[in-house]
Image: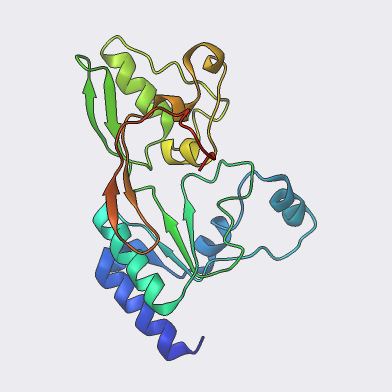
Amino acid sequence: MNEFLFAMILTELEDAVGRENCSTRAIDRVTHSVDYYWLSRMWADRGCRMPEADIIVCPKDASEVSKVLKIANYYKMPVTTWGAGGGTQGGAIPVCGGILLDTKRMNKIYEVNTDSMYIECGTGAIYKHIEWAANEVGKATMHYPSSLTCSTVGGFLAHRGIGVCSTKYGKIDDMVLQMEVVLPNGDIINTASAPKHAAGPDL
């Protein structure tokens, strides 16, 4: 990609999420190039150069994610989502470069509803903060993976998280009632509540 086109894409991303929420700094690109996947750790131990994103983008909500994805689609740039980098399957490694979408600003806990027994939160919320919010009103989520303190709810959903109480209370995907989702083309949808064990392939 030539420098002029790269600068144009960066400017559009800065307009979408704010200049302070975009980075091309080498230190940011390096720290977002590794998670807890064994292969990335092996690469690092052997001194290999890790695949790096070209631009780190930190949107604050679904509308900004939508803008980022529309820009990425227009310029045919790959996008990798980053929660907290605690995954063990390599899903957060930007193997194709492009844009790394860091969800750390999407970390709000909007509501803890004790009547209907649900919590509404952003995908970038660290799960221990969700547990603490439930604890403050005398409740518990009953979802306790070993990465509770260093992973996001979005990361748990992406990896179908499971924890020490999951045999009794279910995995993270058993606990979700509804999601606001940004599709790859930038469209925003809200999912309906539906049983997990529907007929047909597991999508």
Q: Is residue 120 above or below residue 105?
A: above
Q: Residue 151, can we see it?
A: no
Q: Nearer the viewer, residue 118 or 107?
A: 118
Q: Position of residue 100 (x, y in %)?
A: 47, 61
Residue at x-position 76% and y-position 60%: 47
Residue 82: x and y in percent read 48, 51
Residue furthest front in the image? 199
Q: Is residue 150 visible?
A: yes
Q: Residue at x 30, y 76 (%)?
A: 12
Q: Which sits in the foreground, 167 or 140?
A: 167
Q: Position of residue 124 (x, y in %)?
A: 38, 42
Report the front residue among 16 and 30.
Answer: 16
From the viewer's perspective, is residue 5 above or below residue 99? below
Say which quarter of the image contains residue 186.
Answer: bottom left
Q: What residue lies at 50% left-to-right and 24% top-to-bottom?
A: 171
Quick check: 124 above or below 132? below
